[in-house]
Amino acid sequence: MERIPYLGQTIFKWQVGASSFLALPERGARLMNWNVTLGDGSVRDIIYWPEVENLN
């Protein structure tokens, strides 16, 4: 699991198979992004968090 600083918080990134996940457990375990790397190397977002200026 990787820790990534984001807007003053630490989000967590982990991978299971072809899926990658970003979540913020301290804020109710928000799943901020789930994407899948396809066989041709392209990435498809399944769930994504819109661009924001803060996490409040």
Image (cartoon, rainbow, N blue to C red):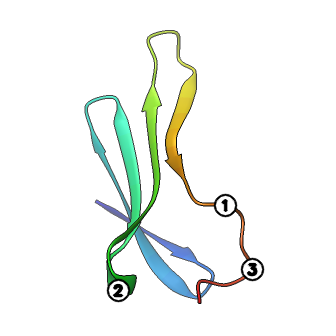
Pointer 2: what residue?
26
Which mark is first along the chain, 3 or 2?
Answer: 2
Secondary element at image label 3: loop
Residue at 38 percent across and 51 percent down: it is 21
Return the residue at label 3.
53
Q: Is residue 49 above or below residue 18?
A: below
Viewer-nearest of discs 3 and 1: 1
Q: What's the distance in space between the residues labelled 2 and 1, CA to CA?
A: 19 Å
Instruction: Indicate the position of residue 48 as horizontal and vertical percent values.
Output: 55, 52
In the rendering, which numbered label is found on residue 27?
Answer: none
| 4 relative position to 52: left or right | left
Q: Amino acid at mark 2?
A: Glu
Residue that lies at the very extreme toward the top in this rendered image: 40
Answer with the quarter of the image where residue 31 lies.
Answer: bottom left
Q: Relative to 11, does residue 20 appear above or below in the rendering?
A: above
Q: Which residue is mark 1?
A: 50
Of the numbered discs 2 and 1, the one sitting upstream in the chain is: 2
Query: With respect to residue 50, does 28 lie above or below?
Result: below
Q: Residue furthest left?
A: 16
Q: Residue at x 43, y 31 (%)?
A: 36
Picture coordinates of residue 41 (x, y %)?
53, 17
